[in-house]
Amino acid sequence: MIFKTIALSFLLLLIFWLTIFSVILVLGPIVTWFKKAPYVPSFGSYLKIMKQHLKLKKWATIVDLGCGDGKALRFFSKEFGLQGIGYDLNPFVILYGRLINRILGYSHIPLIVSDFKKAKLWAYDYIYLYLFPNQLASIEDWIFDRIIENTIIISNSFVFAKHTPFDSIDNNRGKKIIFLYKK
């Protein structure tokens, strides 16, 4: 009897997670299609490389522009002790991220359904971006006009067109994958 109850609970939980994930995969792209900002979570291997190479100040602040489900913010909180907040347009991915944050004990990380251009960039020590080149180009002037001198921008995979990174991190095969910028 107990085995049947456990099996039924597991089955219902699996159905619940598959439903949530299906909604994210189907409705998420529709919501963000007009902004051309698809949900692409940060690769775990890239996060491991950042853990090895980045030297970030503990208790500093970070904002993730286009945070998706908040995976990178959970990483920065766990590995570096950063206080983070994330912005994304996709309400389904944010809802999923909030649920994951609650389950994993990261409910202190706010995930906001909003255009990230409402973020006060001058208030953060770090800005994390995992955006495609066309998206970086469209916000490049905006972002560099609003950060202060010591703010460090961490760009995952892609570079800004007009600014040169002051440092970069290679993957294990010599390809630059993380780019660091300052004003």
Image: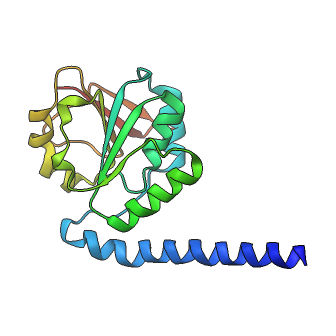
> Residue 165, how many percent across, how many down?
25, 30
Q: Report the coloring of the rendering.
A: rainbow
Q: Nearer the viewer, residue 140 or 98?
A: 98
Residue 172 seen in this snapshot: no
Residue 118 seen in this snapshot: yes
Query: Residue visible at 17% across and 20% down?
Result: 149
> Residue 87, how many percent across, how many down?
29, 51
Q: Which of 27 and 133 is in front in this view?
A: 27
Q: In this view, does 70 lie above or below 58?
A: below
Query: Residue visible at 31% across and 64% down?
Result: 90
* 40 with respect to 147 (left or right): right
**Which quarter of the rendered picture does the N terminus lie within?**
bottom right
Q: Nearer the viewer, residue 111 or 173?
A: 111
> Residue 107, how many percent across, how many down?
48, 46
> Residue 6, how many percent across, how many down?
81, 72
Q: In this view, does 60 lie above or below 156?
A: above
Q: In this view, does 148 lie above or below 178?
A: above
Res 40 quadrant in image:
bottom left
Res 83 quadrant in image:
top left
Tag count = 0
* 96 with respect to 60 (left or right): right
**Which quarter of the rendered picture does the C terminus lie within?**
top left
Query: Residue visible at 9% across and 41% down?
Result: 141
